[in-house]
Image (cartoon, coloured by chain):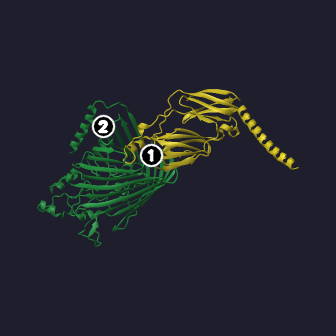
Chain colours: A yellow, B green
Amino acid sequence: MKFYLIRSRAARWFGVVVATGLFSYCTVFAQVGETGDLSGRVNITQPIRENSQIGSQEIIRLYSFSYGGYDATSSNRVAETPRVVIYLESPKNAHGLKISKKWKNAPKFVTIDQKNEQFIPHILPIRVGTVVRFLNSDSVYHNVFSLSPVKSFDLGKYPRGQYRSVKFDKPGVVNVYCDIHTHMSAYILVLDTPYFTQIDSTGHFKMEQIPAGEYRLVAWYGRWPKKSQPIKIIAGKELKVNITFP
Amino acid sequence: MSKTIWTLGLALIAMLAAVPGHGQWTSQFQFGGIYNSIYLSPQDTPTPFTPEGNDPSFISTLTLLMNVSLDDQLSAFATVETLRGLSISIYAMGINWQPGPSPLLQLRAGKFMAPFGNFLERRYASTNPLIGLPILYDYLHDLSAFDVPENNAELLLIRGKGLSLQYPDLGHSSAQTAQATGGERILSGHLPKPGRGMRILSRELYLTGLELFGWAKHWRYAVAVTNGALSNPADRNPNGGVNLMGRFVLLPTTGLVLGVSVARGAYLNKSAVAEKLAAIGKKARDVKQISAGADVMFSYRHLDAWAEYLWNRYQSPFLPQNLDLQGWSIEAKYKFSARVYGAARFNALRFGRIADTLDVDGDGQLMEPWDFNVSQLEVALGLRLNRNSYLKLSHQFNRSFNVPQGDPADDINAFQIVVFF
């Protein structure tokens, strides 16, 4: 009787372990087997120039004893490569998107730095629910604010090394400015799809393990009209797409 | 002396044109404008708090600002303003030159904003969180640039009349004048028509001359030789003298700015008072306005605060004493949200006491302030419509003290729309 009970309990545990392993194995293989890759290149045909400067305020600041004149940082500004955002929408319903394991866990916090009187990065795509930390790395005050309907906020002034956080809980475009340095601007693209990336310095992009299916591919960059086209991801295959922008 | 200043200025421009190798010639043109329209509620009693008069209509102003960086060392600037769409004034025009790589030594020539106090650089409708200006820059007191009181009584009798100023003709009782003229009256009396009193610091404080200035990370300075005076920045040097001014600013930490300012210049219009002053062997350039001020600016999070203190002395050629005053202003702005802010400013003027031997107001006091002491509290609510525009609503509480007829009812409601680009 005692031997029978031991064997039965051990057998039960063995069965649980085997079943779990088989399930996971099947799940993984099922995912890999149901996904494909997307890659391509964005060909930028003309320079993308943005000027958010408010002339009158810049001139007033330039001649101001309190805010202007001394400017050790402007010469250190970097010319940022226009990092076009590529993202996928479900053609029918955004909530109908299947989310693969690779894309499940998006970062909860991302940072926009204010350095050399620039927002870095200038374009930031995030998922709905992400918290953005606005870090001040300059020795002068900045005053980050946005009046966008998607998210309106004013972070006030804080010194170097400190940051203020904002949670973005609605999809859409958020235009971010500095109330003191009007030439500073940034875009935050809040997306309700997990499938997004940005082009690299050569214009290339790649997204792996996208669940097979039909999507709408969108290329977006700030004020420029976005480009979109229908695509189909086939399991086990890589789709290459070239886009001319703008 | 004005010719000297102009000559120096032109010489500087010629020098710059002649100096070879300005480095790489790149041009950066910045242009912008600020439009604002103010509606003031009609006042029961127009007073020097309402320099725009009692016209309950919209007062519209367009300010255009331009800055051209010709290269790393040379830039040119201009500010043009229109009032009510009728008159166009060139408020500023000149050049900046940085001879070397260091920003510690820079020169400015032309007509430029006076380096004095911390309000002038934010006098624009887009940077002033309230609608009104501090009374240091806006209140019309009872001294004129075109006429001089001959005795204390004449001055004391027109206290509070800076909006419509006309000295009463009491005959000269100045012993000095009587002695100079052998007792005969040679003074021609006062101006037949009322004019306006002066502001202590003109709100359009742009002066013509030369300025030496410099910027470092934690301090800045400016010294200037110009025409005009803080109260009378008129063009073409009607004062016949030179205005000297200087400003030093310390930025000990981010968000804190401490400043001191001094100035000394002749404030009377020389052609208007030449005959009178000649009787006592003086000229307009001998009659000075001397000013010293301290200011502070503090910013943190959603709060901006400013404070300014001024000590000012007017020399008056016929009076037995100088005319001193003190003024101060405390102002704060707080952003409640990205679109809404509140602001308030409390400021006051306290005029020095002079002998009132005739007891002009019959109160038995033989020492009186040379103009009525005044205080003002302005509170405002600002609504940011979009990145380039504001709507402001404000109320001013204006109080004049020890007025024999009682404090006039001169509180003001105002509404302003500001659009800038």
Residue that mark 2 sits on: B100
Looking at the image, how many numbered discs can be counted on the residues? Answer: 2
From what the image shows, is residue B352 above or below residue A230?
Answer: below
From what the image shows, is residue A28 above or below residue B387?
Answer: above
Residue that mark 1 sits on: A180
Q: Position of residue B79 (x, y in %)?
A: 36, 42
Q: Amino acid at mark 1?
A: Ile
Name the foreground residue: A22 vs B360: A22
Q: Position of residue A132 (x, y in %)?
A: 56, 45
Name the foreground residue: B273 vs B313: B313
B253 with respect to A170 (left or right): left
Q: Amino acid at mark 2?
A: Gly
Local packing at callout 1 (Cα closer than 10 Å; few below 14, some 14-19, many 20+) is some
Q: Is residue B153 shown to the viewer in this render?
A: yes
Q: CA distance from mark 1 to mark 2?
A: 28 Å
| Chain containing mark 2 | B
Question: Which residue sits at x=14%, y=62%?
Answer: B178
Question: Which residue sits at x=48%, y=43%?
Answer: A114
Instruction: Place residue B159 in its image quadrant.
Output: bottom left
Q: Does dot 2 land on a helix, a strand or a loop?
A: loop
B379 with respect to B227 (left or right): right
